[in-house]
Image (tube, rainbow, N blue to C red):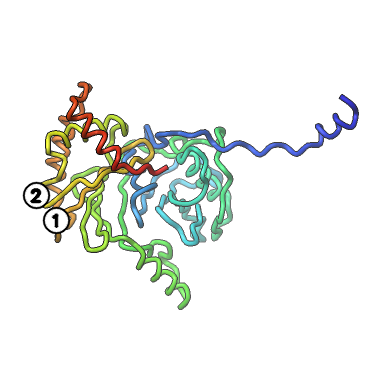
């Protein structure tokens, strides 16, 4: 190799770090995995405040508030009062949603108070996972909101800000948690009520159980309801049912609890029957993957 070639090689710009590798189940081993998937993929306006491990972030912050969305699709915000806000539905798009959120937490903690972060460093395989930063021993309590007023808690808005917030609130799909279920949410799409439940088992195991229920004619939540299909998100399955007109979140709690008991009984290792395999094929045709 000549001197010119060696010099060119020596002065070449370093390669950008590669994004974190794909993780099919990024929230595995976090208490409340189903709730984390709901925050990342399902809920329009929700928050959860969780503790950080001692010394996990710069500045000594003790907790972080995870939200679904922030203004202008910011991935993170360090409020003037020191509160750290990090959005599940914005920011980095590596292959690992857990590391994306961890990168946003670290960036927010390092920023000066009163700083919004329009972007954060891309997560790599060297970035800690969310599991490395949070100090959780039980599933967190997710708060579902009617709108995005949590963006501006304790702050005065001018007329333009109030108008922007009102527009954002008008776009929110009416949503409510179903009592007694870990991660099931009633929502109103148009004038039709629906319920979406994030199942805790691996998506393939859950799909087989759902196929058994479909083949047995017990996949619905009762009279006037029907199973429309399911989402696959972060390694978990999210069945979606259309409900009878006028059904609210309270009205679906008991039927969903009965369904969960049937579902639990269908979680077996037994091979699918021919009828169940046909049911599974139908379910797979009705699945939408959220990645």
The label on residue 154 is none
- Which residue occupies 45% across, 39% down? 98
| Secondary structure found at label 1 | loop
| In this view, 167 is above or below 197 | below
Q: Tell which of 212 and 3 is nearer to you.
A: 212
| For residue 70, side relative to residue 245 (left or right) | right
Q: Tell which of 23 and 56 is nearer to you.
A: 23
Query: Callout 2 environment at 10 Å: few (<14), some (14 to 19), or many (20+)?
Result: few
Q: Earlier in the sequence, mark 2 or mark 1?
A: 2
In which quadrant will I find the N terminus? top right
Q: Tell which of 276 and 37 is nearer to you.
A: 276
Asked if the residues shown at circle 2 and circle 1 are in contact, with their CB atoms under 8 angstroms apart, the answer is yes
Q: Where residue 212 sits in the image (x, y, percent)?
A: 18, 31
**Which residue is identified by label 2?**
223
| In this view, 273 is above or below 73 | above
Q: Residue furthest top?
A: 270
Query: Callout 1 environment at 10 Å: few (<14), some (14 to 19), or many (20+)?
Result: some
Tell me where residue 69 sits by quadrant.
bottom left
| For residue 150, side relative to residue 95 (left or right) | left
| For residue 185, side relative to residue 95 (left or right) | left
Q: Residue furthest bottom?
A: 159
- Which residue occupies 31% across, 53% down? 143
**Which residue is identified by label 1?**
244
| Secondary structure found at label 2 | loop
Q: Where residue 222 sits in the image (x, y, percent)?
A: 10, 47
- Which residue occupies 27% across, 29% down? 205
Tally the numbered discs.
2
Q: Where residue 264 sits in the image (x, y, percent)?
A: 18, 32
In which quadrant will I find the C terminus? top left
Tell me where residue 272 sits by quadrant.
top left
In whole angstroms, how far apart are the C-alphas of marks 2 and 1?
8 Å
| In this view, 282 is above or below 275 | below
């Amino acid at each position: 190799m000549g001197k010119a070639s060696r010099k060119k090689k020596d002065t070449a710009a370093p390669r950008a770090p590669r994004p974190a590798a794909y993780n099919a189940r990024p929230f595995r081993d976090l208490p409340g995995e189903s709730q984390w998937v709901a925050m990342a993929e399902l809920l329009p306006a929700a928050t959860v405040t969780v503790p950080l491990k001692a010394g996990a972030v710069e500045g000594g912050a003790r907790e972080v508030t995870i939200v679904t969305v922030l203004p202008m699709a910011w991935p993170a915000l360090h409020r003037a009062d020191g509160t750290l806000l990090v959005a599940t539905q914005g920011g980095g798009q590596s292959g690992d949603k857990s590391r994306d959120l961890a990168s946003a937490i670290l960036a927010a903690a390092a920023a000066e108070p009163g700083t919004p972060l329009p972007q954060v460093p891309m997560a790599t395989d060297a970035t800690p996972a969310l599991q490395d930063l949070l100090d959780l021993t039980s599933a967190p309590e997710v708060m579902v909101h009617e709108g995005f007023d949590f963006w501006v808690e304790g702050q005065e808005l001018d007329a333009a800000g109030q108008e922007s917030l009102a527009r954002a609130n008008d776009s929110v799909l009416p949503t409510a948690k179903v009592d007694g279920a870990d991660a099931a949410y009633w929502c109103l799409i148009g004038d039709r009520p629906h319920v979406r439940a994030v199942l805790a088992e691996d998506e393939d195991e859950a799909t087989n159980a759902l196929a058994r229920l479909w083949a047995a004619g017990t996949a619905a939540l009762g009279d006037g309801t029907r199973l429309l299909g399911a989402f696959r998100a972060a390694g978990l399955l999210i069945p979606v049912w259309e409900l009878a007109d006028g059904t609210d979140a309270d009205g679906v709690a008991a039927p969903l609890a009965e369904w969960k008991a049937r579902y639990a009984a269908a979680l077996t290792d037994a091979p699918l029957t021919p009828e169940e395999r046909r049911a599974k094929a139908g379910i797979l045709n009705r699945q939408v993957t959220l990645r």
